[in-house]
DNA sequence: CTGAAAGCGCTTACAG
DNA sequence: CTGAAAGCGCTTACAG
């Protein structure tokens, strides 16, 4: 193992000087800098990160916390395709951005029990300089708890009073597709609302209501269906909708996630109900599956790629300057039109 | 920041003793151990990992390398749902296992250029004790290169001469579903082979050929379709198959990945060709999407969960004992029957 | 522009 | 069973 001292000796300078050139300080005379660089190259010197971390107290690592519904049930959910699919779009992009910024990514799946003081291991052990929390399952108290231990936390995908955040406008993200359906002539529009335990639930429901109100369409409770973020629940919602009497049956449904919509597709398929001829459907999140469904599903795109990037940017800013005002950014959504909505004349 | 010295003082012992109890050495008298534990608790002492790493040279972190086709095109592919979906099933499971074993997970997406000496950053910087390489895009030379820098590498999902590995039997994984189709009365069976650049390609093709041979069905080259692991390519394969004259047209197709099959579903849907009535299809990998397709896709399950676990187990063993013989395990595949295959009487 | 020295917080022989 | 001491490989005032 070649150390800074070996390089110093080889270059005929002190460790202090080697350290200065390694860290790019500009107080080094070009000629000696050159000598040091050559010595580094000759010896194949690579700084020991642990030693550096020990003195600087920076880790050059960011933690990513993916939250899960339930510590033991997480796998069950993923079998249904929901969590895995949901997180993966963030994970790889964040890894990529962080790497470009010179940071590593530590991953931890975490189950938060309300009131518990338990924390992700990499935080307790101070292995990370900051942490990104992704998803919408976390609570205010959890974020608060986190911030007691680590100042740099950014919430990704959800509003967060107590930390920096990157999110979209949940309300608008539902108003948009409902308006779109209305513009396509639909007036009886059902809404599969997602999981009420999720912090986005109310914002999204509000978006549904607002869009209807704008258009002078009365809100009907029997058009709103609660459902977890599972395909199987979408299947049930579809059945309930089709069981409504034909004259009041919705002509379109908006699902609070593509994964729920996928379950509805199953029901429609089994019962030979053609989309969009007999019923129009709009999804949400623009998951990778949305373009694989038949017919391809029109969906609301969150721009998770961009959200991931912005989360990394904000993290970087926060790392440079802790304290100061809350940083946050709202990424606008938009509709990706595919083939699941019919225009009613 | 409370250090080991503070604890030592508080407990009236030396740092050596504190270190011993923290590390669970059994050379400490129970009564002093008790005193130390109390002091730790009172002070809220948490060992500094950097300091420990500096002296032990262990990081308690494992690196996960996800390989990508092309450094700049990775995102393009993921838009088609392939890479993201493929890796995510491993990632979260590995994170979970590693955590239970007391290790953290560092993630890096990596593009290997043949002949290049570039390595993932966390390896160069020695931030990890070992590394798991996932996917089937890596090459022998890459693994060899890796092992020069780090002894503990396990290849996950692919045969690997130069490292420990966890994989399935590629050949059998295709023989199995082809036999299944034959048992269901099919004799004209097409095969969408996946990407020839992939190291699994030949093994899988062999499996196809073997199953046919067993059944005395002649191998026909025009029933084999090369395709990248992309939905769009599956779409084309489906078209080509349906363009064959009806009397020699395959009654079933096996796709080398569910993602390719999903593209074929699109074509069949658009052309109102019912699965499995007019054509039977079998997928591969049992991706989360397979049960969301209409009709649900019969697929070959790799047991990625179990593979992930075994990869972590092997890593642990290797960390305990470097050198010695190669460790490897082959996980058997099985078919998950859903509704995409018709029985021909 | 450069270097000697102290110190970050641990672990590890070694002596007792 | 316990402790004093050295050392892991850096960075950081500070002095010159």
Image (cartoon, coloured by chain):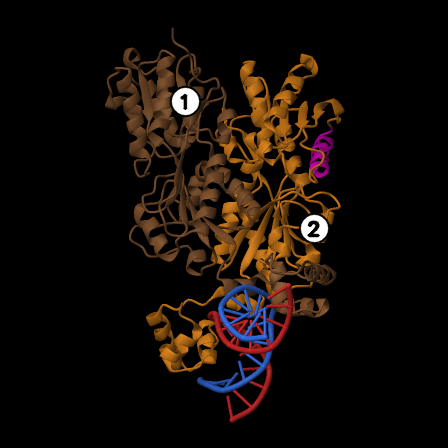
Chain colours: A orange, B brown, C blue, D red
In the picture, the disc for residue B282 is 1
Nearer to us in this view, A305 or B277: B277
Q: Which chain does the numbered disc 2 sit on?
A: A
B244 or A259, nearer to the observer: A259
Q: Which residues are magenta?
A: A201-216
- Relative to residue C11, is residue A4 drawn left or right? left
- Residue drawn where x is 45% and y is 72% of the image: A22
Q: Is B244 or A337 nearer to us in this picture? A: B244
A41 falls in the magenta region: no
Q: Residues within 10 Å of mark 1 (few under 14, many from 20)?
A: many
Helix, strand or loop at disc 2?
helix
Q: Which residue is mark 2?
A: A143
Question: For this view, does B197 lie left or right of residue A17?
Answer: left
Examine the rendered structure and indicate whether residue A78 appears above or below residue B7.
above
Residue extending farthest top: B345
Q: Is residue A41 left or right of residue A18?
A: left
């Amino acid at each position: 193992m070649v150390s800074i001292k070996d390089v110093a000796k080889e270059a005929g300078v002190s460790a202090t000087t080697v350290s200065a050139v390694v860290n790019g300080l500009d107080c080094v005379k070009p000629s000696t800098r050159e000598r040091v660089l050559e010595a580094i190259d000759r010896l194949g010197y690579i700084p020991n990160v642990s030693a550096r971390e020990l003195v600087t107290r920076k880790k050059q690592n960011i933690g990513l916390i993916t939250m899960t519904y339930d510590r033991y049930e997480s796998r069950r959910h993923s079998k249904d395709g929901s969590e895995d699919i949901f997180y993966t779009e963030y994970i790889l992009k964040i890894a990529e951005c962080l790497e470009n910024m010179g940071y590593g990514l530590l991953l931890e799946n975490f189950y938060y029990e309300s009131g518990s003081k338990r924390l992700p291991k990499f935080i307790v052990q101070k292995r990370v300089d900051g942490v990104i929390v992704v998803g919408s399952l976390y609570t205010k108290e959890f974020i608060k708890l986190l911030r007691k231990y680590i100042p740099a936390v950014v919430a990704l995908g959800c509003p967060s009073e107590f930390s920096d955040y990157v999110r979209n406008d949940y309300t608008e993200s539902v108003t948009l597709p409902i308006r779109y359906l209305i513009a396509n002539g639909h007036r009886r529009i059902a809404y599969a609302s997602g999981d009420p335990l999720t912090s986005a639930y109310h914002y999204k429901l509000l978006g549904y209501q607002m869009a209807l109100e704008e258009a002078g369409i009365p809100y009907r409770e029997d058009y709103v269906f609660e459902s977890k973020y599972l395909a199987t629940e979408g299947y049930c919602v579809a059945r309930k909708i089709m069981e409504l009497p034909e004259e009041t049956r919705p002509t379109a449904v908006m699902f609070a996630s593509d994964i729920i919509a996928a379950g509805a597709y199953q029901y429609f398929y089994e019962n030979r109900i053609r989309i969009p001829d007999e019923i129009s459907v709009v999804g949400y999140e623009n998951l990778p599956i949305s373009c694989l469904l038949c017919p391809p599903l029109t969906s609301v795109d969150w721009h998770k790629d961009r959200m991931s990037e912005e989360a990394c940017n904000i993290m970087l800013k926060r790392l440079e300057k802790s304290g100061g005002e809350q940083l946050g950014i709202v990424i606008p959504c938009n509709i990706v039109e595919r083939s699941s909505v019919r225009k009613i004349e």
